[in-house]
Amino acid sequence: MESTVPNPEWDASEHSETINAFESGLGELTYRVWGADWCGDCRSRLPDFFAALDAAGVEDERIHVYEVDDEKIGELTEEYDVTLIPTIVVERAGEEIARFEEQEERPAAEYVAHELFESDALA
């Protein structure tokens, strides 16, 4: 999906707390992202999220992207109860510890980082 290409304009130096959260989970967290290029929210929100993952050095094998159709149906959508896109689920050892869904007002990377700190997943 084109919407998963990191935004080259995203400035990691302005988002040090977000980067720290993602760096703290290196090697332990798995990121699952559902979206589609036809989705305006995905096109506007996911490139910054992927720029944050990239800046933090999150390995590609820890990031799983699932494209959905125009009815929001796709791989693992039922298993993860995905009804909105974009949806981002962060897991540690198969347990969900953070979830971002399209209606959140904060940027995806900032929201996920906050949820990681709040969940004590990085302790």
Image (spheres, grey):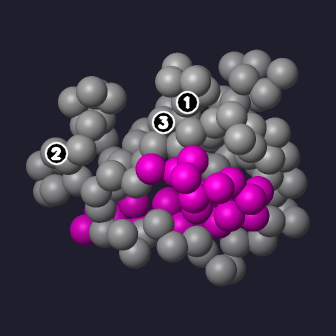
Residue placed under numbered mark 2 in the picture: 73
**Alpha carbon distance from label 1 to label 2:** 21 Å
| Bounds of the magenta segment | 38-64
Amino acid type, residue under disc 3 in the picture: Val
Q: Residue furthest left?
A: 71
Are dots 3 and 1 in contact, CB under 8 Å?
A: yes
Whether residue 84 is visible to the viewer of this picture, yes or no, is yes
Q: Position of residue 8 (x, y in %)?
A: 65, 80
Residue placed under numbered mark 3 in the picture: 89
Left or right, residue 122 beside residue 76: right
Q: Sequence-wise, which precedes: disc 1 or disc 2?
A: 2
Amino acid type, residue under disc 1 in the picture: Glu
Q: Which residue is painted at 65% across and 56% down in the image? A: 59
Q: Between 102 and 89, which is closer to the camera in this rendering?
A: 89
Question: Which part of the image, by quadrant, shows the N terminus?
Answer: bottom left
Residue placed under numbered mark 1 in the picture: 91
Q: Position of residue 120 (x, y in %)?
A: 76, 19
Please, what secondary structure does the residue beneath circle 1 have? Answer: strand
Is disc 1 surrounded by few (<14), some (14 to 19) or many (20+) residues within 10 Å? some
Q: Which residue is painted at 50% across and 24% down in the image? A: 94
Amino acid type, residue under disc 2 in the picture: Ile
Left or right, residue 106 beside residue 83: right
Is disc 2 surrounded by few (<14), some (14 to 19) or many (20+) residues within 10 Å? some
Q: Main secondary structure of the magenta part?
A: helix
